[in-house]
Image (cartoon, helix red, strand yellow):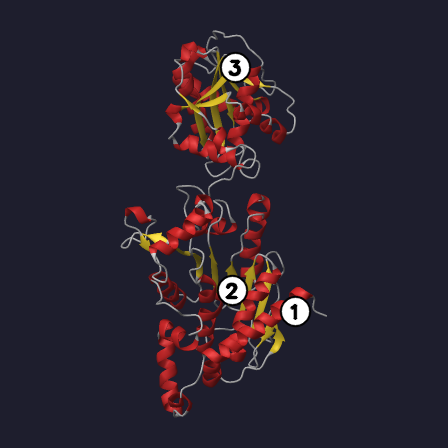
Amino acid sequence: MMNYKEKKAYQEWLTYCDQVRASTPITDKVRNETASAKAARLRKLNSDPVAFAKWYFPHYIDSEFAWFHKKIFRQVDADPNIFGIFELPREHAKSVLVNVMIPMRLYAMGELTGMVVASQNESKAKTLLSDIQAEFQHNQRWINDYGELARMGDWRDGAFSTTDGMGFWAFGRGQSPRGIRKAALRPNYAVIDDIDDKVIVRNQKRVREIVTWILEDLYGALSIKGSRLVVAGNRIHKHSILAHLVGDLEHGDPKREGIVHIKVYAIEHPKTHKKADAHNGGVPAWKRYTIDMLTQKMKKMGYISARREYFHEHHEEDFIFKRKWIQFVKPLPINRYDNIIVYCDPSFKSTDKSDYKAIIAVGRKGKYLDILSTWVRQATTSAMVNHFYDLYDDLESHARYYMEANFLQDLILDEFEEVGVERDYQLPIRADKRKKPNKEVRIENLTPLFERGIIRISEKIRKSPDFETFKTQLLGFPFGKDDAPDALEGAVYFLQRGGRKGKFKARMGKYRTSNSRKL
């Protein structure tokens, strides 16, 4: 028995099937053509994806195809083993292109052996699958050219097949597609359509699990003889599933080797297709829309939502720390601060592809805590240690220098020592030996200090890339990386405990190298 929601979805599908049937009439010329004329017409249609789409799918087309639609057609045509990732804005026909037009043309050319559709959940994947089943069963032009492909199975059950043994399946993310086939035919075309949502991107462990599922379970279920994998969506988060698949999570990161990547912005430069805005000569990427249509829609959506949906930009939301609490101030001369703490939160791995390393310098003047310097990067331990020494060169004994004790003792003391030998002095770094409470609680306890304007930021670092990363982590807390807020908490902890303003001599000579090191 179908529930109300299922009945409504099925009735809507039946109504859509009627629309498909009514929109694809057969002309007398086509109905009465000879076998040779029909074969010539089909060869011509199959050789031109745009002409193919216009003939079979007039119910989808109310505008000319854009440059990126044509490019996607060409790329999928050219490579029977394509791993294509297509980032298109909302309402730019990505689903109909990859879920209907491309696979049906592959079928017509004899290049399809089966198809898999994957999406956020099983229900959405089934809905996407229903579109292509409607075409096979009710598109009059298709039936005239390729025959009555009677239904076997139903999209509501997550799978159907054609009378010639072609299988079509729908899967929600994480569901097992292992072993799917119809007789001897394994699918050789898979579509991953809008796999991300706002919930999963907050759980990076789950995101990585789904990336593995795509690369192993889903891609592995396709035919070894040659398979096309197509990912379509827009980048709703800088660390989304789609972003992980492309590989360029951070600025400068290389893309995944072997992929075909096309990224489209709703408003673009007319020649380069790079991101642009209406006020600096930008034009719609697809002439289906005018610049006024796009700008009006974006204004109503709001800046953050519009940049996410139409430009693939992720702007962190104010979850706990609010953007309005971030206050800038002209910093005092270094010697006028009561105390300065420099605190480092290093990641465990000594590579430039792991978690962020963060070094934050904070000065106290009366009740105020001024963030004077931020260094927040995915960098090597060597780069972090050298920056720590550079800060000492600037601040010297005006500041105290801290790092969590277990890091300092077990991982990177040797690197501090080696750099100290090169610079002819040893950094007077101290160990934070606290038994720390829950990290989220510690960081969240900073919120009243921001809200009351006690924590302020130096105007000098306002436009630095490191501060932008710091701000992203702060405003995104607790759903993203938190190395920078954690380092800030360490600095504030020691400043709030009212340590005296001291003069510290640089620690000279070599540290001990035994397992019983003391700090």
Which is closer to the viewer, label 1 or label 2?
Answer: 1
User: Rounded to the nearest whole Å, what is the CA distance between mark 1 and mark 2?
Assistant: 28 Å
Q: Nearer the viewer, residue 78 or 152?
A: 152
Kind of residue at badge 2: Ala
Kind of residue at badge 3: Lys
x%, y% of residue 232? 47, 58
**Is the N terminus in the top left, top right, bottom left or bottom right quadrant?**
bottom right
Q: Earlier in the sequence, mark 1 or mark 2?
A: 1
What residue do we see at 29% from left, 53% from top? 272
Q: Which residue is mark 3?
A: 367
x%, y% of residue 445? 60, 26
Classed neighbour count for the residue bearing mark 2: other residues with Cα under 10 Å, few (<14), some (14–19), many (≥20): many
User: Rounded to the nearest whole Å, what is the CA distance between mark 3 and mark 2?
Assistant: 59 Å
Q: Earlier in the sequence, mark 3 or mark 2?
A: 2
- Provide the secondary structure element on which disc 2 rests: strand
Q: Which residue is mark 2?
A: 190
Q: Are marks 1 and 2 in contact (CB under 8 Å)?
A: no
What residue do we see at 55% from left, 76% from top? 166
**Is the C terminus in the top left, top right, bottom left or bottom right quadrant?**
top right
Q: Are marks 1 and 3 in contact (CB under 8 Å)?
A: no
Classed neighbour count for the residue bearing mark 3: other residues with Cα under 10 Å, few (<14), some (14–19), many (≥20): few
Q: Are marks 3 and 2 in contact (CB under 8 Å)?
A: no
Classed neighbour count for the residue bearing mark 1: other residues with Cα under 10 Å, few (<14), some (14–19), many (≥20): few
Q: Earlier in the sequence, mark 1 or mark 3?
A: 1
Query: Can residue 403 be seen in the rendering of this structure?
Result: no
Q: Which residue is mark 1?
A: 7
- Provide the secondary structure element on which disc 1 rests: helix
Kind of residue at badge 1: Lys
What residue do we see at 47% from left, 47% from top? 305
- Provide the secondary structure element on which disc 3 rests: loop
In the depicted structure, whether residue 321 falls above or below residue 26: above
